[in-house]
Amino acid sequence: MSNKTLTRMDLSEAVFREVGLSRNESSDLVERVIELMSDALVDGGQVKISSFGTFSVRAKSERIGRNPKTGEEVPITPRRVLSFRPSHLMKDRVADGNKKG
Amino acid sequence: MIRSELVQKLAEENPHLYQRDVERIVAAIFDEIIEAMARGDRVELRGFGAFSVKKREARVGRNPRTGETVSVDEKHVPFFKAGKLLRERLNS
């Protein structure tokens, strides 16, 4: 395990290596992919990328929470949360790649 | 939205690129994320979210059909946490 953190820059670099585009155009494309996925989630609720995984938005209804410091009961407002279900391919690659020995 | 619709949209916005190249670009992005996690790395996309790897400790499980105990090895699983901006956009 190398435990690095990759960013948009590393993804742009991967696009740059893959196709003969400029670094600028590569990074614009990465940005656009992220925007299109975000917009689709905000308006449509689901993004399915085959062999990667599925992002979906779930609606949560109001529930009673508790302020852990004071013990006071407070309502948690209804909200939409994002969940991600990895593909089998991703699960297998992550499990195999991080196996020790 | 599915993968092919994402490719389609990008191709429409970039008429100077062949659809085949747009497919390769999209694949390069998602493959890079998977490869990073396979190495145990995190991928942080500010505003969207972060992909990371979580370790599940070895445990003693049970075969639900027979009730027999089985040992389950330690394993690593992918994890995604939505970014602050996206969480806010989902709730505004």
Image: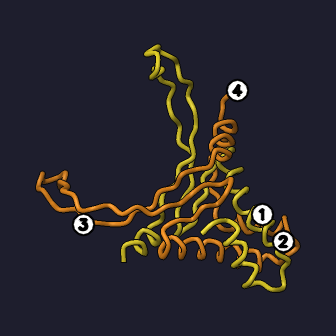
Is residue A44 visible to the viewer in this orientation of the structure? yes
A53 sits left or right of A80 in the view = right
Depicted B9 relative to depicted B55: above or below: below
Question: Where residue B43 appears, x then y in whole percent?
Answer: 61, 57
- SS label for mark 3: loop
Pointer 3: what residue? A77
Residue type at numbered disc 4 = Gly
Which tint was used for chain A?
A: orange
A91 sits left or right of A65 in the view = right
Residue type at numbered disc 1 = Ala
Based on the displayed image, in which of its 4 quarters is residue A73 positioned? bottom left
Mark 4–mark 2 Cα distance, whole angstroms, equals 38 Å
Numbered disc 4: what chain?
A
Q: Are labels 2 and 1 assigned to the same chain? A: no
Viewer-side label of 4, 2: 2
Residue visible at 54% across and 51% down in the picture: A85
Residue visible at 84% across and 70% down in the picture: B20
Residue visible at 43% across and 16% down in the picture: B67
Residue type at numbered disc 2 = Asp
Mark 2–mark 1 Cα distance, whole angstroms, equals 13 Å
Is the residue marked by circle 4 packed among few (<14), some (14-19), or many (20+) residues within 10 Å?
few
- SS label for mark 1: helix
- SS label for mark 4: loop
Pointer 2: what residue? B21
Mark 3–mark 4 Cα distance, whole angstroms, equals 47 Å
Viewer-side label of 3, 4: 3
Depicted A14 relative to depicted B21: above or below: above
Question: Where residue A32 appears, x then y in whole percent?
Answer: 65, 77
